[in-house]
Amino acid sequence: MTKLFHVSDVHFGAEDPAAIAWFSERVAAEKPDAVIMTGDLTMRATKAEFEAGGAWLRSLGVPVTLEVGNHDLPYYWDPLRRLFAPYSRFAAVERMIERPLDVAGITVVPLKTTARAQWRWNWSKGRVSSGSLRRALALIAAAPDDHLIFVAGHHPLIEGGTRGTAKTHGGDQALAALADAGAHAVLSGHVHDPFDVPYERDGWRLRLIGAGTLSKRTRQTPPAFNEIRISGGRFETLVRTMSDAPVHSISETALAGRA
């Protein structure tokens, strides 16, 4: 069996020390094949927060791939850095960003959903540009036909029924294109509550899987991450919570070959 841990929104600078220690203990005890981190490693995108977050991810001792979240870009009060050098503080995690994972039978495809600026007031919400989608589709096309395709980005492409929202511009169109290309799941974060909902298009089922948070900024659920198990032509998602009921949701999907 292959096991992946999907974690998001740790928000170093507002992290929950008990929650990140709990996650580290689970990694050490259960030894997942890899960790997929879907953004908001930091709270205010400071150098110190990136250094702390990077040290923590390296300490896990397993392969890690990291997506960029809206909190990982400089804030509005630093407009020059945000617009012209948004990634200048990424040195501590640069090698993990969109890192390919060497896990047999699995391809993780990055999908950028953040933007330096948008034609709306709330820049924290998601946006999928035509270029970002085109790059993701090219990576899916290049993946082996028998691979499980996980697309990883920060913002949910459509709403997953959580209190928090993503309101991702271009999300509907991106989701349809990813389904047509044969992606099996889209992993995200941002809303701080886990969700797992099916999306069907022309007979193809894709799952939208959201992870909770390991920060102090919890919403409807306690600190949480997702465990994804792949075995025997199926994958299942388990929501692991730091609570008396450590597993509170399970979904299972049969794999199918891509067109």
Image (tube, rainbow, N blue to C red):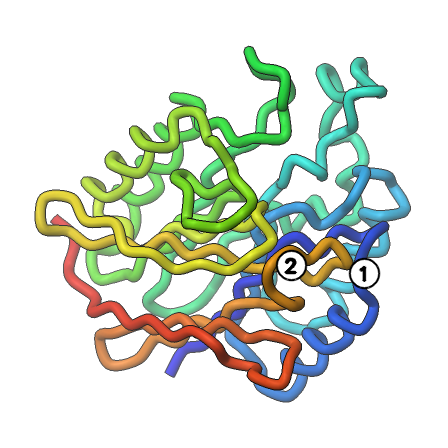
| Amino acid type at image mark 2 | Thr
Q: In this view, does 243 lie to the left or right of 233?
A: right
Q: In this view, does 119 lie to the left or right of 51?
A: left
The mark total stands at: 2
Q: Name the residue under label 1.
A: 55
Could you say which is closer to the camera, residue 107 or residue 9? Answer: 9
Could you say which is closer to the camera, residue 65 or residue 253? Answer: 253
Q: Which of marks 1 and 2 is nearer the N terminus?
A: 1
Per the image, label 2 sits on a secondary structure element best described as loop
Quadrant of residue 117 within the rendered picture = top right
- Image point 76% across, 40% down: which residue? 90
Question: In the rendered image, which quarter contains the N terminus?
Answer: bottom left
User: Residue at the top extreme?
Assistant: 119
On the image, the x and y values in percent for residue 32 come to: 54, 77
Per the image, label 1 sits on a secondary structure element best described as helix
- Image point 47% across, 64% down: which residue? 102
On the image, the x and y values in percent for residue 48 come to: 90, 46
- Image point 84% across, 20% down: which residue? 77
Image disc number at residue 168? none
Q: Name the residue under label 2.
A: 213
Tell whether label 2 touches label 1 (CB within 8 Å).
no
Mark 2 is surrounded, within 10 Å at the Cα level, by few (under 14), some (14 to 19) or many (20 or more) other residues, namely many
- Image point 46% across, 39% down: which residue? 111
Quadrant of residue 144 within the rendered picture = bottom left
On the image, the x and y values in percent for residue 254 come to: 20, 69
Q: Distance between the residues labelled 1 and 2?
A: 18 Å
| Amino acid type at image mark 1 | Ala
Could you say which is closer to the camera, residue 182 or residue 241? Answer: 241
Mark 1 is surrounded, within 10 Å at the Cα level, by few (under 14), some (14 to 19) or many (20 or more) other residues, namely few
Instruction: Name the front one of labels 1 and 2.
Output: 2
